[in-house]
Image (cartoon, helix red, strand yellow):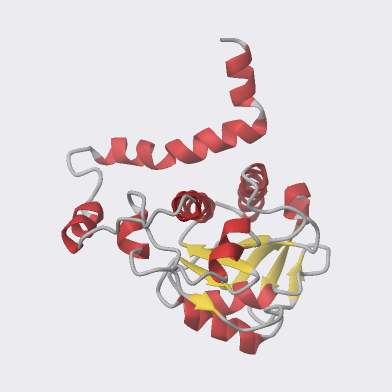
Amino acid sequence: MNTEELAQKLTTGCRILAEQDIVDAFGHLSARLPGDDNLFLMNRGISPALVTPEDFIVLDLDGNVVGGNGTPNAEWPIHACIYRARPDVNSVLHSHQRLSRIFSLSRHKLRGLLMSNVPEWQEGLPVYRGAGLINSVERGDTLARTLGAGSAALLRGHGDVVATGEVARTVLKALNLKENADVLHELLSRGEEPELWSPEDVAAWAAPMHVNVSREAAALLATKSWDYYEARVNGRLAELLGGA
């Protein structure tokens, strides 16, 4: 994937996140630049809901703009410090998603309750407890340590960060995080105490989902969710439903 294609995928990702009320006027989605682990693409300092491919700039891990036009977001250290600490991560999202903010301030941990989220988030998402924007390398490094080897962390009174190996996975993980938080929030709002999974249940959820599926079929299944949400934001789903 070249830089232009990556910028287009990031744009689609931002559209999906906006349509799902995960980003609005604020937030940023990034990806490592193909062929150079020390550079990354991130939307410049405008609403992620409004970006086009031309609104992504290239930054190095010190926050210098080395490609494109525009001013970087003040919280570029979120991305740079996670990339520096995690060679396996190729895409990072920071959002102010409402339920992430709620659980970042709650005595109830945001735990994995739903399907594939269960094994990773069973013990509850870690919470970065520092005050203020993540606008320095020192704070970015602290956040990266809070995230550890995981895919998501909450920022107290602030939002969340999601980090995975690829743009689509980061976007879909953010959707999973919101869905999981919504279910837990609903249970707690009804006065219910969530029934947590046993260690045996967690192991069952951790088992490969597509054991008896061919590699080709598994690849198609992996893109199904992205294709659906992309169709929602590019108008294709509306056209199909309108013609039904």
Which residue extends farthest right? 70
Residue at 51 percent of width and 56 percent of height? 170
Which residue extends farthest top? 244
- Whether residue 199 sits left or right of residue 146 in the image: it is left
Measured along the vertical axis of the image, is residue 53 above or below residue 105? Answer: above
For the residue pair 68 and 19, the one nearer the viewer reads as: 19
Residue 233, image x and y in percent? 65, 35
- Whether residue 178 sits left or right of residue 71 in the image: it is left
For the residue pair 110 and 213, the one nearer the viewer reads as: 110
Residue at 19 percent of width and 53 percent of height? 204
Residue at 67 percent of width and 83 percent of height? 131
Measured along the vertical axis of the image, is residue 241 above or below residue 202? Answer: above
Residue 160, image x and y in percent? 58, 66
Location of the C terminus by quadrant is top right
Residue at 73 percent of width and 52 percent of height? 24
Let me know if residue 115 appears in the view: yes
Residue 189, image x and y in percent? 50, 53
Which residue extends farthest bottom? 138
* Residue 219 position by quadrant: top left
Let me know if residue 33 appears in the view: no
* Residue 230 position by quadrant: top right
Measured along the vertical axis of the image, is residue 72 above or below residue 219? Answer: below
Report the number of discs. 0
* Residue 197 position by quadrant: bottom left
Residue 51, image x and y in percent? 76, 50
